[in-house]
Image (spheres, rainbow, N blue to C red):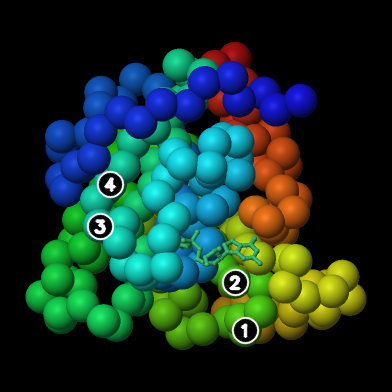
């Protein structure tokens, strides 16, 4: 049974300074548009409608806070790398998100979503380097694992890690998920709950 008992939308903001008071542990989700972020959030909290999914990429354009079990915040961040918006708009989202990531003191972990079918892309690589440079703790979450068979999943992840190792000394923790099959979501919840416990004790 899921340990998520309650999940409620709290507030959307364009400025991290207006986010809810930072007295609770916080976990944020980010990825390129269409990576499956909304679907994954909904699968984690077991509510098909909490984060909006749509076939219109680039729609999450604010910092969205949800409160889980009244104990921690789940944050849905705008997707990055969406080409079909103006350059000034892209810049605006970038500043909004990077300020949130840099200055949100209670951000315990950022989950960076990557489509399991994709190889290591420059845009993701650069983003992860920026995270590391700014000492923002993050994990990698491969999404849509149901789109490839188990062997291909392993191969793709091995190749991804192999590519990362060329530039990274330590590889972040990795999760493999499918929102469609509901796999990997429990591992993420366990990880979050474990971090919550470590911080409290
Ligand atoms: P977002 O833009 O990152 O929030 O992505 P969405 O959650 O809206 O998903 C984008 C598209 O991918 C939608 O058509 C989803 O139905 C599809 N999708 C998302 N997650 C999965 C998954 O785990 N498996 C499969 N097969 N499709 C998925």
Q: Nearer the viewer, mark 3 or mark 1?
A: 3
Please state, as top left, top right, bottom left or bottom right, where the C terminus lies in the image: top right
Residue occupied by mark 4: 63
Q: Image quadrant of residue 20? A: top left
Q: Residue, x 39% and y 41% (percent of image)?
A: 75
Residue occupied by mark 3: 61
Q: Secondary structure at mark 3?
A: loop
Of mark 1 and mark 4, the one earlier in the sequence is 4
Residue occupied by mark 2: 115
Name the spot of residue 35 as percent of width and height, x first.
51, 67
Give the answer, above or below, for where 178 lies relative to 160.
above
**Frontmost residue, 55 versus 83:** 55
The reply to whether callout 1 and callout 2 are in contact (CB within 8 Å) is: no
Please state, as top left, top right, bottom left or bottom right, where the N terminus lies in the image: top right
Total numbered circles: 4
Mark 1–mark 2 distance (CA, rounded to whole Å): 9 Å
Q: Point out which mark residue 119 bears.
A: 1
Q: Nearer the viewer, mark 1 or mark 2?
A: 2
Q: Residue, x 66% and y 79% (percent of image)?
A: 117
Q: Is residue 169 left or right of residue 20?
A: right
- Number of residues whose C-alpha sits closer than 10 Å to that of mark 4, classed few (under 14), some (14–19) or many (20 or more): many
**Mark 4: C-beta under 8 Å from nearest atom of ligand 1:** no
Q: Image quadrant of residue 31? A: bottom left
Mark 1–mark 4 distance (CA, rounded to whole Å): 27 Å
Give the answer, above or below, for where 140 lies relative to 46.
below
Q: Image quadrant of residue 92? A: bottom left
Name the spot of residue 51 as percent of width and height, x first.
42, 45
Mark 3–mark 1 distance (CA, rounded to whole Å): 26 Å
Mark 4–mark 2 distance (CA, rounded to whole Å): 22 Å
Q: Residue, x 65% and y 54% (percent of image)?
A: 179
């Amino acid at each position: 049974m899921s340990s998520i008992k309650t999940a409620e939308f709290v507030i959307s903001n364009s400025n991290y300074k207006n986010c809810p008071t930072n007295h609770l542990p916080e976990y944020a989700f980010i990825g390129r548009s269409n990576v499956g972020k909304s679907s994954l959030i909904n699968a984690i909290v077991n509510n098909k409608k909490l984060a909006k999914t749509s076939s219109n990429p680039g729609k999450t354009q604010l910092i969205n806070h949800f409160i889980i079990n009244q104990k921690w915040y789940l944050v849905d961040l705008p997707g990055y790398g969406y080409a079909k918006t103006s350059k000034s708009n892209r810049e605006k989202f970038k500043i909004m998100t990077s300020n949130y990531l840099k200055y949100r003191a209670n951000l315990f972990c950022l989950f960076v979503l990557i489509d399991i079918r994709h190889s290591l892309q420059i845009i993701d690589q650069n983003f992860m380097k920026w995270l590391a440079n700014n000492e923002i703790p993050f994990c990698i979450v491969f999404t849509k694992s149901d789109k490839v068979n188990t062997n291909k999943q392993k191969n793709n992840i091995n190749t991804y890690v192999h590519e990362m190792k060329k530039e990274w000394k330590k590889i972040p923790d990795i999760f493999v998920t499918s929102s469609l099959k509901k796999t990997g979501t429990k591992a993420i919840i366990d990880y979050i709950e474990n971090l919550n416990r470590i911080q409290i004790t």
